[in-house]
Amino acid sequence: MYLPELTTLDVDGLDPRLPVVIPFAAIEQHGPHLPTGTDTYITEGLLRRLDSRDDENFIWLPVQRFGSSSHHMPFTGSLTLSSRTFLDTARELVECFFAHGFTRFILLNGHGGNQSLLNVAVQEARLGPGNVIADEARAGLKIVHATYWVLAAERFEEIRESAPGGMGHAGEMETSVMLALHPELVKTDLMEPDGEPQRCRFDHKDMLEPGKVGQFRLWNEWSKRGPIGDPTVASAEKGELFLEAAVDAIAELIEELKAGRIG
């Protein structure tokens, strides 16, 4: 169920144990071949497909389009929120539905730069005002952060054709999914590999093989045109496979949250 399409009476009549999915994405550069809204288009596409399977299994909010993208700011068209603004937005959206009696939340993520902040947002929402120790009223609050490609990593690994390094940013996976969802927005004549190779064993390879240390690099320090990975091996057919794998994984997480085995 998509919140903007419901009336206040519709929401008031829902079981407060119904999972609330709050999605986060970004508006930022995705190289010369993909639109700045790629993360937002993909995240919304996943939820619309999940909603079409069973529209009474969860309620979802509009995708929060602006994310933590300061690392992409060297490329024109990128937008970012400060860390504190992003965290406050995430926490306050949870608080709204918690105030209405809902107790199960998934902060669903579609942008790599949001991951660390969403982990903090889960902590802040769970603890509540003061951010020191949860009060008794929050004893039943179940909340998790989930990034779709992490949930579906095993299936994604089976689908991919590029070598490690090919699925970093605007690479094989995101380009394939956009070809499946919005082919009219993909400039296929501008697709080419980009991004520096892994520098040492602790360094980042791609979204399925993240680095073993925390680091912050501006995007123009390791990409010439914006992408990291190989979009030339992308296809709409693979995009459909990636989409189905991610939707399956999100659906499984919703069931585990409803069963009380996570959060």
Image (cartoon, grey):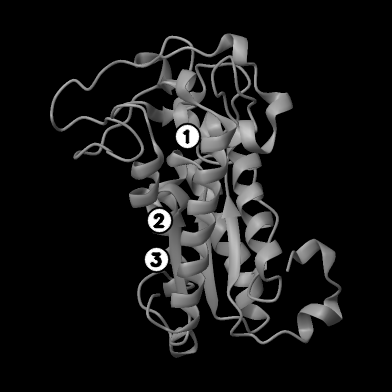
Q: Amino acid under label 2?
A: Leu
Q: Between residue 26 and residue 167, name the one nearer to us.
A: 167
Say whether disc 1 or disc 2 marks the residue closer to the N-terminus: 2
Looking at the image, residue 212 lies above or below residue 203:
below
Q: Is residue 167 above or below residue 258?
A: above
Report crowding for label 3: few under 14, some 14 to 19, many 20 or more residues within 10 A (C-alpha).
Answer: some
Give the image location of residue 49, x and y in percent.
66, 56
Q: Which residue is mark 1?
A: 173
Is 119 rendered above or below residue 169? below
Which of the two residues, 110 or 237, is positioned nearer the viewer here? 237
Tag 1: amino acid: Met
Lower position in the chain sequence, tag 2 or tag 3: 3
**Residue displayed at 41% across by 69% down:** 131
Q: Quadrant of residue 1?
A: bottom right
Q: CA distance from mark 2 to mark 3?
A: 20 Å
**Residue position marked by numbered label 2 in the rendering:** 151
Label 1 vs label 3, nearer the camera: 1
The answer to which image quadrant residue 230 occupies is top left
Per the model, the C-alpha gap separating discs 1 and 3 is 30 Å
- The x, y position of residue 119, in whole percent, is 39, 57
Where residue 263 sits, quadrant-wise, is bottom left
